[in-house]
């Protein structure tokens, strides 16, 4: 009898395509459980869909449309795109639509509103759709043409990825966070070390992380070239999803004797100090001490990577009672309306404002060259976002350093890249 053991992702994909077993590198035709698009590519997707001559969306209850990149609209062009998206939503009866002021950044909204459940196949017109793997789903970004076909048929083909098992053990020494952890992992894998592969995160460290912290790991799996990132659901996952949906979902688990293409062991004790990804790559990772003292023009706390409540809390702990450096701008953007409201209730946003920060309604903001915080020639930014390629957030001569919310907040106070330990102690 052939070996039927499968990894978590292989099990999810086998269920989706109605097979008993799938193996890496097979091309399979998947039944999509959830499709997501946003304002950056939603209007293009709608136009492609209508070019296919489809009369209806395959299942309006399985489509989520979220405005998050260009809202509130930054110019006439983006206003027109959003108008076209609204027409598409109304015409085809899309049941899950999040307008500006009612949702937030798409990846956060999918998770906190219970759209993603363990074992699902989730696709989105955004590379960071991998974020949803924190709930135990197979979640991957796809292109506009592919999404148009998904909207018509509910199907997408996928190459079954090999799985790289990243086993992480040990305790993250305060003030290290999951952002430092994923930067450490990227420094080992590089930007193409996981091409056509799944990164599955496991180990005692992952089990102790909050779901919000785990989301940072799966969000940045794509920065190693991975098809998706995923974490096996556990009690924390179920509690998170029960809070989002009111129900305890069923789970899918990989077989204990499944074959992994590669195993990587990470010991958190090897991470001696907070980390920073220096330009021009998320994998160009160095200890903060190597770049400490680098002048910054802008600091950004937010994005789908680190705009959650725990991120704002640690940043505010540093900012409280202090001022943003006179030569630096600090932009703070909660990842969703729910987080925005909670941060208001806890007084976090008031602390940021008193410190001289600009606080925005939930939007992608200066994560990319699109809106609210674009960098000028030669400017330097430190950000909690996920990419720092040249021109990612503005002029091609600008530079972006990636770091944790604690490191970004400390740097905003000093006006230069700074180790947050001096503000937080032990």
Image (tube, rainbow, N blue to C red):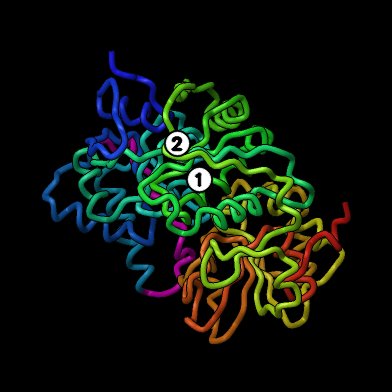
Asked if one can make out residue 43 in the rendered structure from this viewpoint, the answer is: yes
Taking depth in this image into account, of 29 and 80 the one nearest to the observer is 29
Rendering coords of residue 152 (x, y %): 19, 43
Q: Secondary structure at mark 2?
A: loop
- Residue 305 magenta: no
Depicted 223 relative to depicted 212: above or below: below
The answer to whether 30 is drawn above or below residue 306 in the figure is above
Considering depth in this image, is 251 or 241 the residue closer to the camera? 251
Counting other residues with Cα less than 10 Å from the Cα at mark 2, is it few (<14), some (14-19), or many (20 or more)?
many
Q: Is residue 58 left or right of residue 320?
A: left
Residue farthest along the top direction in this orientation: 1
Where's the N terminus, which quadrant? top left
First in residue order: circle 1 vs circle 2: 1
According to the image, label 1 marks what residue?
A: 109
Give the residue at x 78% y 47%: 173
| 183, 16: nearer the viewer | 183
> In the figure, residue 75 lies in which quadrant?
bottom left
Q: Position of residue 45 (x, y in %)?
A: 26, 56
The residue located at (53%, 28%) in the rendering is 233
Q: Is residue 106 left or right of residue 185?
A: left
Q: Is residue 95 visible?
A: no
The outermost residue toward the left is 53
Q: Which residues are magenta?
A: 59-76
Query: Percent position (x, y) of residue 228?
Result: 42, 44
Please name the residue that numbered disc 2 is placed on.
Answer: 115
Q: In which quadrant of the rendered view does residue 41 lie?
A: bottom left
């Amino acid at each position: 009898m052939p070996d039927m053991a499968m990894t978590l992702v292989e099990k999810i994909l086998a269920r989706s395509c109605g097979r008993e077993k799938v193996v890496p590198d097979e091309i399979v035709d998947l039944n999509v459980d959830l499709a997501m698009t946003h304002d950056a590519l939603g209007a293009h997707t709608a136009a492609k869909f209508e070019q296919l001559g489809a009369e209806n969306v395959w299942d309006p209850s399985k489509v989520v449309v979220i405005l998050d990149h260009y809202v509130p609209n930054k110019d006439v062009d983006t206003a027109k795109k959003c108008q076209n998206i609204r027409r598409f939503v109304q015409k085809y009866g899309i049941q899950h639509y999040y307008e500006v002021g009612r949702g937030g950044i798409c990846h956060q909204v999918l998770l906190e509103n219970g759209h993603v459940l363990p074992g699902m196949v989730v696709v989105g017109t955004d590379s960071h759709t991998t974020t949803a793997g924190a709930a135990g789903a197979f979640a991957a970004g796809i292109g506009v043409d592919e999404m148009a076909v998904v909207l018509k048929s509910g199907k997408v083909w996928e190459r079954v990825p090999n799985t790289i098992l990243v086993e992480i053990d040990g305790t993250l020494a305060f003030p290290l966070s999951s952002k430092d952890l994923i930067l450490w992992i990227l420094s080992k894998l590089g930007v193409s070390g996981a091409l056509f592969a799944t990164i599955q995160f496991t180990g005692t460290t992952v089990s102790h992380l909050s779901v919000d912290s785990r989301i940072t790991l799966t969000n940045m799996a794509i920065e190693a070239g991975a098809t998706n990132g995923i974490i096996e659901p556990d009690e924390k996952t179920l509690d998170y999803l029960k809070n989002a949906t009111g129900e305890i979902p069923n789970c899918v688990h990989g077989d204990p004797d499944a074959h992994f293409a590669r195993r990587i062991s990470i010991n958190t004790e090897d991470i001696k100090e907070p980390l920073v990804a220096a330009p021009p790559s998320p994998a160009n990772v160095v200890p903060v001490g190597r770049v400490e003292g680098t002048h910054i023009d802008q600091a950004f706390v937010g994005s789908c990577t680190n705009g959650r409540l725990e991120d704002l809390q640690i940043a505010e702990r540093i900012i409280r009672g202090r001022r943003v450096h006179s030569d630096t701008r600090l932009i703070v953007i909660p990842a969703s309306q729910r987080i925005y409201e909670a941060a208001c209730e806890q007084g976090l946003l008031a602390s940021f404002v008193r410190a001289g920060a600009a606080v925005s309604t939930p939007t992608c903001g200066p994560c990319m060259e699109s809106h609210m915080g674009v960098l000028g020639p030669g400017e330097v930014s430190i950000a909690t976002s996920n990419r720092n390629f040249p021109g990612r957030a503005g002029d091609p001569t600008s530079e972006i350093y990636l770091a944790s919310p604690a490191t970004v907040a400390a740097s905003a106070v000093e006006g230069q890249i700074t180790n947050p330990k001096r503000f937080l102690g032990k």
